[in-house]
Amino acid sequence: MIKKIENKSEKAEITDRILRDLPNWFGIETAIVEYVENVQRMPFWAVFENDKAVGFIAVKEHFEKSAEIYVMGVLTEIHRKGYGKQLVDETEKYLKYHNFEFYQVKTLSDAHPHEGYGKTRQFYLSCGFIPLEEFKTIWGEANPALQMVKKL
């Protein structure tokens, strides 16, 4: 079951707990703290299994017609069960309803050899996002960012 979460402390708790379960993707303490703080002000959904949040997604609305997956995560033990796709689909419904036209996400570029992020890129491709541009200044030379976009 997917549920839109409005309560700031619930958003913070879910984000903190799940990101800490994903050290291969979210291993920098300052980044986790920043995500936990920022998601409290964003549209936020969680997917539940047996009344426990097992995944989440937060959307950053940039402009009137464009938004971004700010951060998302699904507990490691339930990867590849379709929960991530369900979360993306749910946010797309919300964005279309509110007349957004473009959806983007940034992830680690394939210029950085990280097996986990290879799977992440494949996931976003399967959701219909296409690579647009690589940036070496967002996260630094060692962590080139790949911007992927989707027309809604």
Image (tube, rainbow, N blue to C red):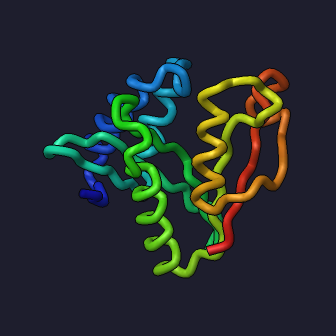
Query: 144 above or below 113?
Result: below
Residue 127, placed above or below residue 52: below
**Residue 5 makes an appearance in the image:** yes
Q: Residue at x 72, y 53 (%)?
A: 148
In what quadrant of the picture does the C terminus appear? Answer: bottom right
Determine the residue positioned at 58% across, 59% down: 127
Q: Is residue 82 above or below residue 101?
A: above
Residue at far left of view: 50
Left or right: 50 as drawn, with respect to 44: left
Q: Position of residue 9 (x, y in %)?
A: 27, 41
- Residue lying at 42% horizontally and 35% vertically, measured from the top left: 36
Q: Residue at x 80, y 21 (%)?
A: 142
Q: The N terminus appears in which quarter of the rendering? A: bottom left
In the rendering, at what x and y percent does residue 47 appear?
30, 50
Q: Nearer the viewer, residue 8 or 147?
A: 147
**Picture quarter containing residue 128?**
bottom right
In x, y percent, where is residue 134? 84, 43
Indicate whether 92 appears above or below 75: below
Nearer to us in this view, 55 or 70: 55
